[in-house]
Image: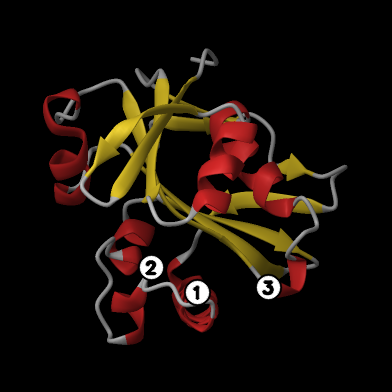
């Protein structure tokens, strides 16, 4: 598959972590990290990502790996972070973003940003989020879009503090986007 993106800088946090395209053989480790995060969310009273605990992956992570849409953050060869960057809006994105989302729009759709609980409060979440909008360039894409559950004000504040603009609410989800100028 010929990539339509360029990783400008694979290093984050002073070169202690590197980000790369996920490989098929990393799928089990990636899913394990996502499921661990879903369990942690559940322990905090959130039903966010609860489908993963029932065997349902609304973002088709394994299929997204094959499409080179999943990126892993590693420290000493251990996967400590994951993010999905979709070049085309999923059905979920189409539902949330409405007429703003269409097949050849200028947006990247960010999903499943997660870091290992061992790395919580280390700045890795912000570093990986900032990598998504400044250290990778996608042909013909000028904005990164994401959504988060409206009942999580801490997450809402996290995205805003990292430069994402609140674009409104659709159902139980808040919508954010950030312009990128690295194309």
In front: mark 3 or mark 1? 1
- In the image, residue 94 lies at what x, y percent? 15, 40
Is residue 1 among the parts visible in the rendering?
Answer: no
Give the structural element (helix, strand or loop) at label 3: helix
Q: Which residue is drawn at 14% across and 49% down?
A: 91
Can you say whether 20 is above or below 120 in the image? above
Q: What x and y, as percent, mark residue 133? A: 55, 30
Label 3 Cα crowd, 10 Å radius (few <14 / some 14-19 / many 20+): some
Q: Quadrant of the N terminus?
A: top left
Mark positioned earlier in the residue sequence (3 or 1): 1
Position of residue 37 relative to residue 13, above or below, is below
Helix, strand or loop status at disc 1: helix
The span from disc 3 to disc 2 (Cα, nearest Å) is 16 Å
Residues at marks 1 and 2 touching, judged by CB atoms closer than 8 Å: yes
Which mark, by number, is residue 48? 2
Q: Could you tell me if residue 113 is visible in this image? A: yes
Q: Which residue is drawn at 20% across and 47% down?
A: 171
Residue 148 image position (x, y, % from top left): 40, 49
Q: Which residue occupies 68% across, 73% down? A: 117
Q: What residue does disc 1 label?
A: 41
């Amino acid at each position: 598959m010929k990539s339509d993106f360029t990783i400008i800088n694979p290093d984050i946090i002073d070169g202690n972590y590197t980000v790369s395209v996920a490989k098929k053989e990393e799928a089990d480790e990636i899913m394990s990290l996502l499921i661990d995060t879903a369990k942690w969310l559940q322990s905090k009273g959130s039903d966010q990502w609860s489908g993963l605990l029932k065997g349902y992956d609304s973002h088709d992570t394994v299929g997204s790996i094959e499409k080179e849409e999943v990126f892993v953050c590693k420290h000493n060869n251990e996967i400590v972070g994951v993010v999905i960057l979709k070049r085309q809006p999923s059905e979920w994105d189409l539902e949330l973003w409405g007429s703003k989302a269409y097949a050849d729009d200028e947006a990247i759709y960010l999903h499943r940003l997660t870091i290992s609980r061992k790395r919580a409060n280390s700045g890795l979440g912000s570093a990986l989020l900032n990598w998504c909008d400044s250290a990778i360039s996608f042909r013909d894409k000028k904005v990164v879009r994401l959504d988060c559950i409206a009942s999580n004000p801490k997450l809402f504040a996290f995205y805003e503090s990292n430069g994402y603009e609140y674009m409104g609410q659709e159902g139980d989800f808040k919508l954010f986007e950030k312009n990128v100028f690295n194309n």
